[in-house]
Image (cartoon, rainbow, N blue to C red):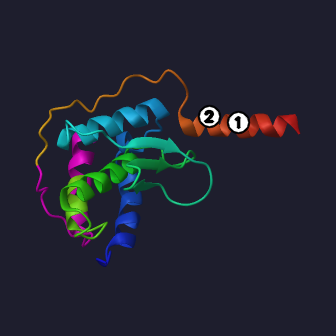
Amino acid sequence: KIRDSQRSKVYKWEFTIRELDSNLNEQLTLPQAQELTDKAWQRYYPKGPSPRVLIRNGHGNSFYKINSHTITLRPSWGVIPTVILHEVAHAITIATHGLTVAMHGAEFMGYMLELWKWYSGTSFVRQAQSSKLKVVPVRLKPTAKRSAKLKPAKTASVATQVQEDKEQAKQKK
């Protein structure tokens, strides 16, 4: 098994970036999360099925599951572009390199940073490198030109819906 030596550094660094770019921190609806996942995946694998997005309550991390090709997000904090594109970067890294590279290694960082730039228009490579994170340019170049622009939300974001459900439950008590 490959050692994932920069995992905790990646997570800490991501939290600082969320504060710098509001586009990456925007709360999305489930349809928007799936649309973003589809567009990001199809930049690299336009013919293959993109990961399916699931929302699960409970504690713990958001994650990409290889066997089912799914991304599981947490409703109160995980339905934002930073987290979604982080998980898509895992899917792309695994599809491209298999399990031969660290899950938060230089290859993963290359894909995640490319996806963040595609979505927000801002490159964070220098910030990552100045935080001593290893980054290599993506091996697989995007083949499909997809706009990162999402369709307008028809409902409230997942986080807002969860908060409203909690408030309604309190009022019923």
Is residue 31 left or right of 106 when viewed as pictured? Answer: right
Find the magenta span and give its range: 112-140
What percent of the width, then of the height, locates residue 121? 22, 40
What percent of the width, then of the height, locates residue 170? 81, 40
Q: Residues within 10 Å of mark 2 (few under 14, many from 20)?
A: some
Whether tag 1 and tag 2 are in contact, CB under 8 A, the answer is yes
In the image, what residue type sits under mark 1? Answer: Asp
Q: Residues within 10 Å of mark 1 (few under 14, many from 20)?
A: few
- 170 over 88 or under it: above or below: above
What residue is drawn where x is 37% and y is 23%? 151
Furthest toward the right, the residue is: 173
What residue is drawn where x is 30% and y is 53%? 91
Q: Name the residue under label 1.
A: 165
Q: Mark 2 points at which residue?
A: 161
In the image, what residue type sits under mark 2? Answer: Gln
Residue 171 is a magenta residue:
no
Is the N terminus in the top left, top right, bottom left or bottom right quadrant?
bottom left
